[in-house]
Amino acid sequence: MRAGVTVQRQGACDDLQKYHAKLILFCMCCLAVGFMSGCRHMPARRPSLEWVMINVNQTGQQADAHLIRVRDGKTILIDAGHRNTAESMLLPFLRREGITTIDSVFITHPHIDHYGGLEYILRSGINVGEIFFNLPDKEVCDREIPWGCNYQDVLTVRKLYSSYGVELKKASAGMKFTLGDATTLEILYAFDGVHTPVGKTDVNDLSLVMMLRHQGIRCLYTGDLNKKIGTYVAQFPKRIAADVLKVPHHGTESTVPDAFFQSVSPRYGLVPAPASLWQSQRSRRIREWFSLHQVPVFVNGLDGDIRVTVNRSHLHIEKEGRKLKSSPSR
């Protein structure tokens, strides 16, 4: 009898251990399922660097606007597009991205397709910390009457910006800005159209030329850089070499010479232009250079908003939410 009782108790203990093991396994599975379900609802961690060439282009009218965000760092805007597309294209994009503060705005040069949208940003309630917007030489500006630079309008909008309590600052070559996470933005060149290495220039050649550096990736911003200053700058390839080039002057013929593209030697080109302009005769030379050198080009008018992201020195380019390229820094 005692032996039988012992065996019966031992069997009960084995059953209890098996039950406990199953219970533990069941709880672990529930925790795992809960964790995975929670992960699906967690917001994705932003990349360490994000640059979007915002599509502020429409048929028959080109413009420039670039949003740059550094994770746990600053948010900046290079150019702000035209007034005509501010409410229909620029502001909706900024709202979708949840932008409530822009630390710094850089207006590359005083053409309305580069500064026109900024007043709408200020009116929308987005907080702007500072604006770099150089006042052009009046003589240089007036040479473009009635189609180009409007000196009186520039004075008016600068006064408007100040009325919002935003500090206006002068951008100069050599300025270097720390954006966080070992990211810098440097102004390489900034000419006034009068005192330059190549004599007097047009307003496009007042464009700030800026280099963004992050985790070994270099992005070059060129505004509407034209032939005179573009030819001069092309002499310094080590200074302007970049992984990604914001193609100057919307990729049209009067822009920089081929020697400039050769000096930059980009892996990718981004063109802020409507499809009709990029596909026209005016852009043929630039199209052919990128095609001949097998450099992929992304165009607002064809691809919508273009998003460049960097994580762990890897560069990714997306158009309309679809990832196209992924490659490490060179």
Image (cartoon, rainbow, N blue to C red):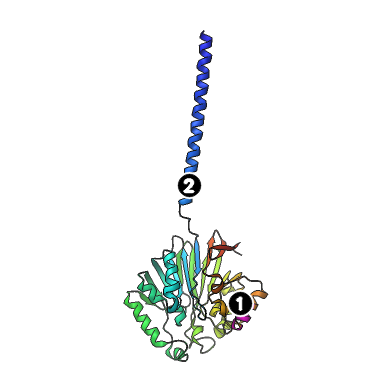
Q: Amino acid at mark 1?
A: Phe
Secondary structure category for the residue under label 1 = helix
Q: In the image, what residue occupies the spot 63% across and 75% down?
A: 290
Mark 1 vs 2, N-terminal side: 2
Residue in front for this viewpoint, 161 or 31: 31
User: Residue 114's spot in the image, x, y percent?
Assistant: 46, 78
Residue in front for this viewpoint, 250 or 235: 250
Q: Is residue 290 above or below residue 37?
A: below
The image's mark for residue 156 is: none
Of badges 1 and 2, the one in the foreground is 2
User: Residue 29's spot in the image, x, y percent?
Assistant: 50, 38
* 269 in magenta: no
Q: Which residues, given as a range, are shown in magenta?
A: 281-287
Q: In the image, what residue occupies the spot 52% across and 17% down?
A: 10
The quadrant of the rendering that contains the C terminus is: bottom right
**Image quadrant in which you'd find residue 256:** bottom right
Q: In the image, what residue occupies the spot 51% across and 86% down?
A: 196
**Image quadrant in which you'd find residue 242:** bottom right
Q: Is residue 36 above or below residue 12?
A: below
User: Residue 86's spot in the image, x, y percent?
Assistant: 43, 75
User: Distance of mark 1 from mark 2, alpha carbons?
Assistant: 48 Å
Q: Is residue 261 above or below residue 323?
A: below
**Which residue is tagged 2?**
37
**Which residue is tagged 1?**
261
Residue in front for this viewpoint, 48 or 307: 307
Q: Amino acid at mark 2?
A: Ser
Secondary structure category for the residue under label 2 = helix
Q: In the image, what residue occupies the spot 65% across and 74% down?
A: 291
The answer to whether residue 328 of the structure is visible from this angle is no
